[in-house]
Image (cartoon, rainbow, N blue to C red):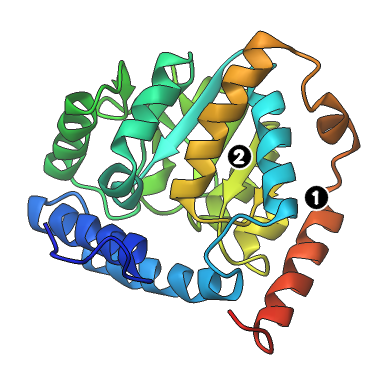
Amino acid sequence: MLSVPEDHPRYESLLLRERLVRGFEMGLVVEAGLIAHGRGEAFDYLLGEETVEWADRATLAAVHCMYRSENPVLSVNGNVAAVVPDLVGELSRRGIKVEVNLFHRSEERVKKIISFLREHGVIDVLGEDTDMLINDLSHDRAYVSEEGIYSADTVLVPLEDGDRVQALREMGKTVISIDLNPLSRTSKTADISIVDNVVRVLKNFNKYWMRVEEDGSFGIDVYKSFDNEENLRKMEEIMRGGFVGDN
């Protein structure tokens, strides 16, 4: 574990980097995943590395959406598995299916990620036996499980994945994205775009899910009035302000 004082201003960020490095050494994360994380971290700086109001609203709307879904599925890649396995485990125990879906796919890597997720409490991980194809995708993300992503009515897609988001929407699915870039094809294509760090999102997601389980009316007004175009416009304004602010 990286030796960083807990009062260090970069403490959380450095620990997150360390998880990714360990994930790389374990074969969960590929080199491109490290680059992708650095790109997202740059956008997070513009948010002051905190969850802003509009990202919080999007997360709450996403919880209501998935809570009301018949077959909600969380798509997991190597980066997600490496940095938030325990939070993924919490979601799986709330009835959300988890499926490993990779751009840089190998059977060995899929098995390692599934094993790692199970060690962290994720139940019934799909993705090893891929028996269906998503049309119009010419890379390995097209391989999916019929029980999971293929038959899902709502798919939660953390981190950038624009072409698959488009393909899933064309299949009639509701797609929720987690992507720190509000200008990405992923964010612009998803039904609900959460522009925030995946760690903060999944923490808040689990918190709000419990609140909605206790009281279905909690935050329902946010869900019913949610406008993703407005959400992305506000997030872009906040980030542009970050260029001249104290972030």
- SS for callout 1: helix
Q: Which residue is mark 1?
A: 228
Residue closer to the observer: 101 or 46: 46
Q: Is residue 97 above or below residue 162?
A: above
Q: Residues within 10 Å of mark 1 (few under 14, many from 20)?
A: some
Q: Is residue 176 above or below residue 193?
A: above
In the picture, measured across the screen, residue 224 lies left or right of residue 148, that is right
The disc labelled 1 sits on which kind of residue?
Asn
In the picture, measured across the screen, residue 24 lies left or right of residue 59, that is left
The disc labelled 2 sits on which kind of residue?
Leu
* Number of numbered tags placed on the structure image: 2
Using the image, tell me which numbered label, if any, was put on residue 168: 2
Q: Earlier in the sequence, mark 1 or mark 2?
A: 2
Name the residue located 40 percent from the left edge and 15 percent from the top edge. 93
Q: Is residue 139 above or below residue 123?
A: below
Q: Is residue 107 above or below residue 246?
A: above
Callout 1 touching callout 2 (CB < 8 Å): no
* Quarter assignment of residue 118: top left
Residue 193, image x and y in percent? Answer: 67, 50
Residue 238, image x and y in percent? Answer: 74, 71
- SS for callout 2: helix
